[in-house]
Image (cartoon, rainbow, N blue to C red):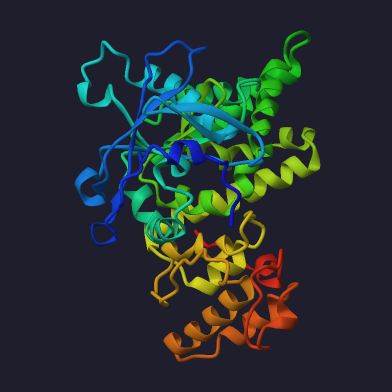
C-alpha cells in the first residue's frame, strides 16, 4: 500500500464523514487564497456531495506525490494535517494562480472561492475500501472538474523563464481564427527570431536561452507517473503550473510540436531531448486521440504505458482502467491479500472470458517481467518496464 503520511491525530477528530458509494460521493476542500504567502496553508474539508451535483463547480489538482517521507503540515478545518511536501507546494502555487486568474475585484463572483479536489486530503487514505472505490471512478472526478491544475514543479526555487517564454511565444502569433494560418505564422516567427539571434553580436542568445529554459519542465517526475496520465487525459481544461508561472495546456499543445522541428533542441542534454519527445508523442497525441476517438483497448494502452511508474505496482493497471473501452470487471482492491501476481492472473482470465479471443497471447510474449515465472504462460506481466509493443507502435493521432 502506498505509504501515505501519518495523520492519526487528525483522524481522531472524526472530520472524515463516510461517503456513499451508491451516490459516487466525493469530498471537496475550500482553499483560503487570501492569506499571505508566508502564512500557513489553510483549507476546509467540505461535507460529502454526489459527484453529479458538483460537475463543473470545482478544480482538480494533478501532481507527483514524491518522497512520502518528505512532508509538510497544512491546516484542515483548523487541525494540523500532514501532506506530501509536493502537495503543499501545489496548494501554495494554486493560491497564486487563483489570485491572477480570478482577482477579488473581478466580476466572476462564482470563481472567487477556490474549491479543490486533492486526492490526499479528499480521500481518507487510511480507509482502503474508500480508497479502492474512489480510484474506481477517478476518470469521472477529473472529467467533471471545471479545470485541472497540473503542477510540474515541486518547489518555488525554479527558473520560470521557459514557461513565460512559451506563453509569450504563443501570444506573439495571432491565429486569426485559422488553425493552419496559426502554424504557418508560428513557424515564420520562429525562423525569423532564430535568424536574428544567430546574426546578433551581443544579446542575441537570449531567445535561444529562454527556449532552452523550457526544457526544465520536462525533467519533472510528473511526466513519468501512472496516475497523472489518466488525470491529464480526462481533464476538460488543464493549466500547467511551474513555480509562479502558468500556461494553459492547449497553448502548450499548439506550440510544442512546432518547436520540436528546430535544432535548438540539440543544445539540450540528450536525455532531456528524449524526454521531451516522449512527452509530446505520448501525452499530446494521447490527448488528441482520446478526445477524438474515445477510450482505448486495455492491453494496447498497458503496452504503450510501461515507461510510466508508480509506488504501488498495482496502480500500473488500476490507473488506466478508466480510459478503456470495455468493462472487464476489474475492481481496484488495495488490500494486502491482493498481490500483483494474483491481480495479473485474474485480469488475464477476465480479458479472455470477456473478449472470447486469444489476442492476449501476443502480449504475453512481449510483456515479460520479474513476475512472469509466477504467472500462467498466457498472462502478460505488466510490471515489465518495456516491450517490443512500445518500441514498434505509437499512439496514432
Q: Is residue 170 visible?
A: no
Residue in the picture at 53% in, 34% down: 82
Q: Position of residue 317 (x, y in %)?
A: 54, 66
Q: Looking at the rendering, in which quadrant would you find the N terminus?
A: bottom right
Q: Position of residue 11 (x, y in %)?
A: 44, 41
Residue in the picture at 21% in, 26% down: 110
Residue in the picture at 48% in, 67% down: 333
Count of numbered circles in the view: 0
Q: Is residue 150 above or below residue 20?
A: above
Tell me if 266 is positioned left or right of 376 in this view. right
Q: Position of residue 49 (x, y in %)?
A: 24, 46
Give the farthest residue toward the top. 202
Q: Quadrant of residue 14?
A: top left
Q: Is residue 177 visible?
A: yes
Residue closer to the observer: 150 or 74: 74
Q: Quadrant of residue 223?
A: top right
Residue closer to the observer: 271 or 209: 271
Tell me if 270 is positioned left or right of 51 in this view. right
Residue closer to the observer: 183 or 77: 77
Tell me if 386 is positioned left or right of 319 in this view. right
Q: Position of residue 137 (x, y in %)?
A: 37, 58
Q: Is residue 393 above or below residue 98?
A: below
Tell me if 185 is positioned left or right of 24 in this view. right
Amino acid at each position: 500500500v502506498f505509504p501515505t503520511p501519518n495523520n492519526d491525530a487528525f483522524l481522531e477528530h472524526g472530520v472524515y464523514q463516510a461517503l456513499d458509494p451508491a451516490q459516487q460521493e466525493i469530498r471537496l476542500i475550500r482553499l483560503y487564497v487570501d492569506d499571505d504567502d508566508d502564512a500557513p496553508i489553510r483549507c476546509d474539508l467540505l461535507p460529502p456531495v454526489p459527484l453529479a451535483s458538483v460537475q463543473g463547480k470545482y478544480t482538480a489538482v494533478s501532481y507527483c506525490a514524491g518522497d512520502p517521507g518528505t512532508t509538510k503540515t497544512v491546516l484542515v478545518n483548523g487541525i494540523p494535517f500532514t501532506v506530501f511536501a509536493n502537495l503543499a507546494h501545489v496548494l501554495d502555487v494554486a493560491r497564486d494562480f487563483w489570485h491572477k486568474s480570478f482577482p477579488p475585484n473581478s466580476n466572476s463572483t462564482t470563481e472567487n472561492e477556490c474549491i479543490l479536489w486533492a486526492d490526499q486530503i479528499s480521500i481518507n487514505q487510511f480507509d482502503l475500501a474508500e480508497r479502492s472505490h474512489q480510484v474506481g471512478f477517478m476518470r469521472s472526478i477529473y472529467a467533471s472538474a471545471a479545470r485541472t491544475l497540473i503542477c510540474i514543479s515541486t518547489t518555488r526555487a525554479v527558473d520560470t523563464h521557459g514557461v513565460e517564454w512559451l506563453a509569450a511565444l504563443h501570444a506573439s502569433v495571432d491565429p486569426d481564427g485559422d488553425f493552419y494560418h496559426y502554424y504557418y505564422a508560428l513557424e515564420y516567427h520562429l525562423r525569423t527570431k532564430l535568424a536574428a539571434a544567430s546574426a546578433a553580436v551581443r544579446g542575441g542568445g537570449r531567445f535561444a536561452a529562454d527556449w532552452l529554459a523550457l526544457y526544465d519542465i520536462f525533467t519533472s517526475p510528473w511526466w513519468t507517473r501512472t496516475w497523472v496520465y489518466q488525470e491529464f487525459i480526462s481533464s476538460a481544461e488543464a493549466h500547467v503550473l511551474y513555480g509562479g508561472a502558468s500556461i494553459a495546456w492547449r497553448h502548450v499543445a499548439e506550440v510544442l510540436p512546432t518547436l520540436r522541428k528546430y535544432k535548438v533542441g540539440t543544445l539540450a542534454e540528450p536525455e532531456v531531448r528524449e524526454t521531451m519527445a516522449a512527452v509530446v508523442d505520448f501525452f499530446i497525441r494521447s490527448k488528441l486521440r482520446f478526445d477524438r476517438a474515445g477510450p482505448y483497448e486495455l492491453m494496447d494502452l498497458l503496452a504503450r504505458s510501461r515507461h510510466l511508474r508508480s509506488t504501488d505496482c498495482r496502480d500500473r493497471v488500476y490507473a488506466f482502467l478508466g480510459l478503456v473501452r470495455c468493462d472487464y470487471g476489474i475492481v481496484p482492491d488495495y488490500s494486502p491479500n491482493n498481490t500483483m501476481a494474483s491481480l495479473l492472473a485474474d485480469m488475464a482470465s477476465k480479458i479472455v472470458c470477456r473478449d472470447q479471443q486469444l489476442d492476449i497471447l501476443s502480449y504475453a510474449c512481449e510483456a515479460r517481467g520479474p513476475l512472469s515465472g509466477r504467472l500462467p504462460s498466457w498472462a502478460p506481466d505488466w510490471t515489465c518496464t518495456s516491450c517490443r509493443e512500445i518500441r514498434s507502435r505509437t499512439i496514432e493521432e
